[in-house]
Amino acid sequence: MEKANAAVEQGMISTYSELIELDKKHFLHPTSPIKQQQEKGATFIFDKGEGIYLKDIHGNKVIDGLSSLWNVNIGHGREELGKAAMEQMARLGFSSCFATFSHEPAIRLAAKIAELTPEGLNTIFFTSGGSESNDTAFKLVRHYWKLQGKPEKKKIISRKRSYHGVAMGATSATGLKPFRDFTTSLAPDFYYVESTGAALRSFIESEGAETIAAFISEPIQGTGGVHLPPQNYFKEVREICDEYDILFIADEVITGFGRTGTYFGIEQFGVIPDLMSVAKGITSGYAPLGGVILSEKIHQDLIEKTEGLFMHGYTYSGHPVSCAVALKNIDIIERESLVENSRVMGEEMLKGFKWLQQEHSIVGEVRALGLMGAIEIVKNKQTAQRFDKPISPLIVEESMKYGLIHRGVIYEGADTLIFAPPLVISKEEIHKMINLLDKALTAVEKQLE
Ligand code: PLP
């Protein structure tokens, strides 16, 4: 905090206090501790980013251990993306993709994504983010079954502890109850099952496959606490969906674009979904963009069976600036072999977690796939018993003092630390992250004595 003192001397502090007050008064923060925001003000007012680091307006530098919202895959401060956006804005800041209008950035990006996706997933519908992608997917699968003459196939099944976003459909599909409890009426026809093939099968049999449109799942549950699926889970899911004529949507909003060490998370499990929702890493967060990627079969059926217009589109579906940014982002992912780096550095991160497990009495199970990892906080390692109240918020607060940002998950009885650093992270930076975490864990263990 020396830099903060320097900032006071430079007279910056008056701007800072002003920003804190304006922030409290005028800015309702997304997914935020609303009372704490009023009492304590913003924890950080960020001003700059470089690589895995964020800097606040006082010049304090912190490691962005969650790539902000699991999205800044290529790291912060990449001028090339700024340049791509500027050039596109200057040339064509916006034009519509409704009806039969088009433009080169959207066309090139759609074609590029078809090169990267699993076989047969070759067409994309663009959105502005993950929630819109999932709401689009839900509308699309229902529309698809309607075109097949089966309008009663409309139920959507998701997994308990899943997170699919906050639009009405996405909220309704989210298996984490606190997100649904935020509001009252939800969208109808959404159901949640436990994460086993047997649970999915028995649900389908009890409801009737003729009423079910699709099953949606994150390849690795992110917000729910970085949960890897049970072994063989997605193979079973694929078989069950085929057997009962149910579409399988992979929510790749976090896991897409290299996060798990392959381009898309579902590739880790050797199956191909019918649709994939993407967002976040598609632009590394430099511009808002998402999409739903469709199988050739679905696309062909839509073309053949739609009478009249395809009645779904956002103003910003295929925004030219976002598409230009995405193209440059993918260029960087490829040029710098970031998917491979995610795999290799993910192994290094997991090694670090295992070392922490040996060093700390409160570190229980650890897990990671690529640069997506979690540490369970426990009172008793043998029994995996938790503390009476969640400890991860204390660790997160302590880490922040040492210069590391990450998140604690405490939904539905969890007490889990989650990590997803930018894919550009180096071995030295992984070690630094683990060392800071080691300090934070030591400090919290002392408080618990
Ligand atoms: N799906 C998953 C798996 C997510 O993790 C998220 C956001 O974290 C979303 C969907 C929603 O995306 P957005 O916040 O861009 O609407």
Image (tube, rainbow, N blue to C red):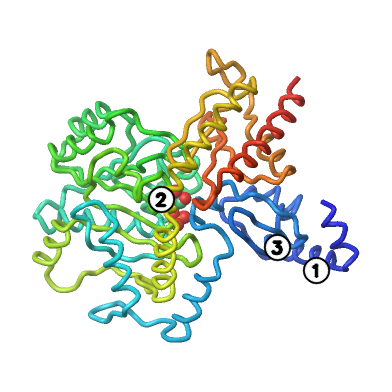
Q: Point out the tag, 1 or 2, that comes first from the N-terminus.
A: 1
Q: Residue at x 51, y 32 (%)?
A: 412
Per the model, the C-alpha gap separating discs 1 and 2 is 41 Å
Q: Residue at x 64, y 46 (%)?
A: 405
Image x and y of residue 264, in percent: 34, 49
Label 2 CB, ligand 1: below 8 Å? no
Mark 1 neighbour class, 10 Å CA radius: few under 14, some 14 to 19, many 20 or more: few
Per the model, the C-alpha gap separating discs 2 and 3 is 37 Å
| Amino acid marked by disc 1 | Thr
Q: Point out the tag, 2 or 3, that comes first from the N-terminus.
A: 3
Label 1 CB, ligand 1: below 8 Å? no
Q: Secondary structure at mark 1?
A: helix
Q: Which residue is mark 1?
A: 15
Q: Is residue 318 left or right of residue 374?
A: left
Any mark on residue 326, and which? none
Mark 3 neighbour class, 10 Å CA radius: few under 14, some 14 to 19, many 20 or more: some
Q: Which residue is mark 2?
A: 339
Q: Point out the tag, 3 or 1, that comes first from the N-terminus.
A: 1
Q: Secondary structure at mark 2?
A: helix
Q: Give the label, 2 or 3, closer to the camera.
A: 2
